[in-house]
């Protein structure tokens, strides 16, 4: 089983940018799909973005695709989430998730490995 660990969260102001990292340890990512999900207090877990390992194709929640970018570094065994123009509604715990298959992408069920998450708080 792969262990995932997110980093890069923190307290920022609206309009700021952050880059999250998700590092795999124990072994490499499953090489199917790696995704970012987020969960705000009192809300359900929400799909943010995903990247496919064999094609490097990327997928985004429609509401976030203009501000967020997912990428990966095979050598560093790391997946990133670049977040620009942050808004207060982006406040949430951001989780990295991984699985060996390609579909479905945006549903949290089916992802076999999860990181503990990193908190992002965006103040006005």
Image (cartoon, helix red, strand yellow):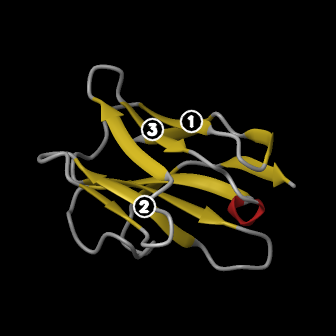
Gap between marks 2 and 3, in whole Å?
14 Å
Compared across the picture, whether 58 is left or right of 81 comes to left
Image height of 65 relative to 83, above or below: below
Please give the label number shown on residue 65. Answer: 2
**Residue situated in front as seen by the camera: 67 or 44:** 67
Instruction: Report x, y in % for residue 119.
Output: 74, 48
Compared across the picture, whether 65 is left or right of 104 comes to right
Q: Are marks 2 and 1 in contact (CB under 8 Å)?
A: no
Q: Are marks 1 and 3 in contact (CB under 8 Å)?
A: yes
Instruction: Report x, y in % for residue 37.
Output: 52, 62
The disc, 2 or 1, on the residue closer to the chain's N-terminal end is 1
Image height of 77 relative to 59, above or below: above
Gap between marks 1 and 3, in whole Å?
7 Å
Q: Nearer the viewer, mark 2 or mark 1?
A: 2
Q: Secondary structure at mark 3?
A: strand
Where, by quadrant of the figure, is residue 118 drawn? top right
Which quadrant does the C terminus fall into? bottom right
Which residue matches tag 1? 19
Q: Secondary structure at mark 2?
A: loop
Where, by quadrant of the figure, is residue 89 drawn? bottom right
Residue drawn at x 71%, y 58% as measured from the top left: 87
Which residue matches tag 3? 80
Image height of 112 relative to 116, above or below: below
């Amino acid at each position: 089983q792969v262990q995932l660990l997110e980093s890069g969260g923190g307290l920022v102001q609206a309009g700021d940018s952050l880059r999250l990292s998700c590092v795999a340890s124990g072994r490499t990512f499953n090489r199917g799909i790696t995704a970012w999900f987020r969960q705000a207090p009192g809300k359900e877990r929400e799909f943010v973005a995903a990247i496919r390992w064999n094609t490097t194709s990327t997928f985004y929640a429609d509401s976030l695709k203009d501000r967020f970018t997912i990428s990966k570094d095979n050598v560093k065994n790391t997946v990133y989430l670049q977040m620009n123009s942050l808004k207060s509604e982006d406040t949430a715990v951001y989780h990295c998730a991984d699985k060996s298959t390609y579909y479905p992408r945006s549903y949290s069920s089916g992802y076999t490995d999860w990181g503990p998450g990193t908190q992002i708080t965006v103040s006005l």
